[in-house]
Image: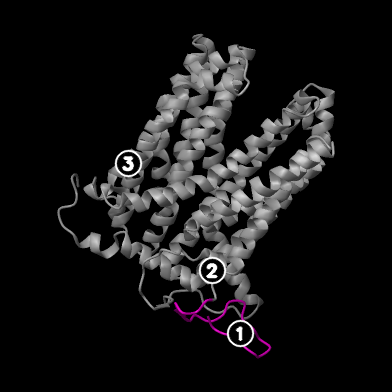
Amino acid sequence: MATMAKDTEVPLLTPIGNYNEDDELHNPILKPSNWPFTNSSFKADEDDIQQIRGVKDLIREFSVESKKLWYLAAPAIFTSVCQYSIGAVTQVFAGHVGTIQLAAVSIENSVIAGFAFGVMLGMGSALETLCGQAFGAKQLEMLGTYMQRSWVILTTTALVLIFPYIFATPLLKFIGQTPDISKWAGMFAVWMIPQLFAYALNFPIQKFLQAQSKIMVMAAIAAVGLIGHTLFSWLLMLKLGWGLVGGAVVLNGSWWFIVVAQLVYILSGTCGQAWSGFSLKAFQNLWDFVKLSFASAVMLCLEMWYFMALILVAGYLKNAEVAVDAISICMNIEGWMFMVALGFNAAISVRVSNELGAGHPRTAKFSVIIASITSLLAGVFLSLVLLFSRSWYPPLFSNSAEVQQVVYELTPMLAVTIIVSSLQPTLSGVAIGAGWQAYVAYVNIACYYLFGIPIGLILGFLLDIGVKGIWYGMLAGMTLQTGVLIMMVLRTNWNKEASLARDRIKQWGGDSEAKENGENLVS
């Protein structure tokens, strides 16, 4: 790393330099202990961002990077909202079918399908690292191979995850749900098994398209899927009286429509060299791929299960019904706000992985700075909107005056949570883009489960602060995790990460695989 200039005009980004493996400037905890590469130096590409010495340079580069970021983030946010809304629409129509049907769909979505969604999305996130870095390195032929490997792994995972769907009724009874709700939710879960295999194909496809910045087509398909889902849900669930069976048929159909539409787009030749046909290479290097996929799944699931655990803990408080309702409402608001942050997560993951793969460590670093500032400002704006509307939005979710009052009191903490959670997914996206999933998983365990939940239990139960104490604990865990991620990013040697990206591509394919002949089964 170049030393800082001693004159008064210090550039924001230091000059491009060579990286030497012997330098221990990178945080040791982030260094993969078993990474087998032997290159001793790394030189950044000449196209990397140049020095920023003044306000004019900063404004110019900020504008350029912001356009790239929003080009990815805006359609990614829209896609996330549409896909999140598909499940919400089914719940809305289930509420018109009956109270127990609404409870059954809600429980199945949050417990059974929610568990599977977290595992599958997490394992699919490994492609954000691999496809993004391969695309940046112009190893386009590897993207299709990586996607097929992920299909193999996720389809195998889906076969394992069938069992919670089949045995959903006894599982839900075991965790305390009523027999009627467990019965209806179990029936709905069995009908929803096809959705599980749609996940197995959809998440790798989305990461494959994201790495190439082909997000607009994903947004368009998601929008059409949501519109069709709404119309057919009304027709089958209410007009034709199919009830939950109709809801399951439409929900499965909507997810499979998204999968098929995206596949048609890919197979039509729009992705160029990134898709050259089905290949037997999909079955090579599976173990290394499984390890990265598993680390990605653990990283994401630890975050998702953290919020599920808080709702379960709230059920043991005094006046548990009010506590659970209030936390559920706040979590619902946080979920919608999180869709915005998730768009930035996808965008910065693509930007970092592409730039590292292209040998642009300084551009990757600058992308992180711009994305962090932008997502943080978005979180502040959304928090202010929530604070100004704290007196009228609680009645939209509950008719209980007691629940409304608790939500009103939780709103300031919810606003702070939104600010923290606006930055945290962006930093997680950096981790995914750089391939740090395993290390972030350890961070999540420590911050969430060894710190956040115990703090919440102490405040909520021992000190009798109640639902506020539970929320304080959650916020403490999130804040600590965000702080640790910030330190990881600040101490990162981006030249070294670019070198790791280059060697990862060489180890898992790259030039050697591209030069082999006869690998395609279908061209």
Q: Which residue is mark 1?
A: 4
Disc 1: CA contacts within 10 A as few (<14), some (14-19) or many (>=20) = few
Q: Which residue is mark 2?
A: 28
- Dot 3 amino acid type: Val
Q: Earlier in the sequence, mark 2 or mark 3?
A: 2
Nearest-to-viewer mark from 1 and 3: 3
The magenta segment: 1-24
Residue 214 horizontal/vertical position (percent) = 42, 50
- Dot 1 amino acid type: Met
In the rendered image, the vertical position of residue 361 relative to residue 207, given as above or below: below
Horizontal relation, residue 208 to residue 187: left or right: left
Q: Nearer the viewer, residue 389 or 198?
A: 198
C-alpha gap between disc 1 and disc 3: 48 Å
Helix, strand or loop under label 3: helix
In the rendered image, the vertical position of residue 167 relative to residue 206, given as above or below: above
Q: Is residue 381 visible?
A: yes
Residue 152: mark in rendering: 3
Q: Is residue 468 visible?
A: no
Please tell me whether the stretch drawn in magenta is mainly helix, strand or loop. loop
C-alpha gap between disc 1 and disc 2: 22 Å
Residue 264 horizontal/vertical position (percent) = 32, 38
Helix, strand or loop under label 1: loop
Q: Is residue 3 magenta?
A: yes
- Dot 2 amino acid type: Pro
Helix, strand or loop under label 2: helix
Horizontal relation, residue 518 to residue 431: left or right: left
Q: Earlier in the sequence, mark 1 or mark 2?
A: 1
Quadrant hosting residue 174:
top right
